[in-house]
Amino acid sequence: MSKEQIDFESILNYIHNEVTKEVQRGQVASYIPELAKVDPEHFGIHLRPIDHSPIGIGDFSTPFSIQSICKVLSLAHALKLLDTDIWKRVGVEPTHEPFNHLSLTEKGNGIPNNPFINAGAIVVCDMLYSQLENPEKDFLDFVRNLSDDSSINYDKKVYASEKANGYRNHATASLLKSLNNLHNDVEQVLNFYYLQCSLCMSCEQLSKTFYCFMNGGKNIVGQEFLTPSQTKRINAIMLTCGFYNDVGGFAFNVGLPAKSGVGGGIVAVYPGKYCISTWSPGLNQKGNSLLGIKALEMFTTETKLSIF
Ligand code: GLU
């Protein structure tokens, strides 16, 4: 994969031109009122190959709410601190349900199917809450170190907006508590979960942050955050659970481990080769960025660089 072989810049410019012509952009998430204010016309894409300088097109440097993409980062933090112990409290199986489905914890022992559905992510938050002295600060420090970027921060307006409307997550956390898979106070764990979801990053920052998952566990400045084995597991869960009930469609159309968020962001990795992020706030019916998926499908088709 060298510059001579693939002209990434032309491909990304072509994708940007094609995708931004689209009239159907999907619906901006409105169940978190602060997200409903975002202009659906935004579109950004940023590519960070392992052996080529990074390329950004469109709104690639505008920060947005990463929402569920944070679940990969909290899983990474928990794996770093607790390693395989975390699998005693959360599974690794995909579901065919939406991200906020409640029945997942009702099925039996209170162990959510995977760490990327809300129930699983709330359990991971609970684990971190027990481990960290100052969860708000320590998690942010972890993300800033991972990305080598101290400008990354929470968006407290988005946090407050989700907290004020978080009825389903409250129900999920209460159900987990009743099934003995939440060790801390429901409100405190949910506050921490909403803070994580409110993390704000641009496509450029997302590609930098996820470099570690593309690079066997070493971040952008070569610091080892995860073992190659832990990195392999996270990428596998992204591939099988990163798009909720749209995961088969994403694997079929794009063919990369990836994670989406209701803020309209998607970040995808090709282990050992590149990281790519897109942002378009309009979502499809399954809550994933409509144009982001289209752009990534075009990218892996044009470059022939999918894992399949
Ligand atoms: N904070 C959102 C929620 O819990 C995340 C959902 C998502 O991005 O998929 O509802």
Image: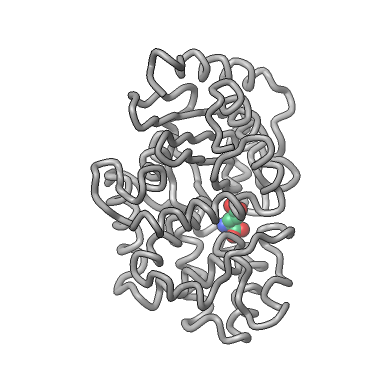
Q: In which quarter of the image is the N terminus?
A: top left
Who's the residue at 35% across and 46% down the image? 152
On screen, 73 above or below 87? above
On screen, 88 above or below 164? below
User: Residue 170 occupies which quadrant of the picture?
Assistant: bottom right
On screen, 31 above or below 270? below
Residue 217: x and y, percent? 34, 51
Q: In which quarter of the image is ligand 1?
A: bottom right
241 or 123: nearer the viewer? 241
293 or 172: nearer the viewer? 293
Residue 283: x and y, percent? 68, 40
Residue 57: x and y, percent? 47, 22
On screen, 228 above or below 257? below
197 or 222: nearer the viewer? 222
Residue 67: x and y, percent? 53, 51
Q: How many marks?
A: 0
Colour theme: one colour
Who's the residue at 71% across and 65% down the image? 101
Who's the residue at 34% across and 64% down the image? 80
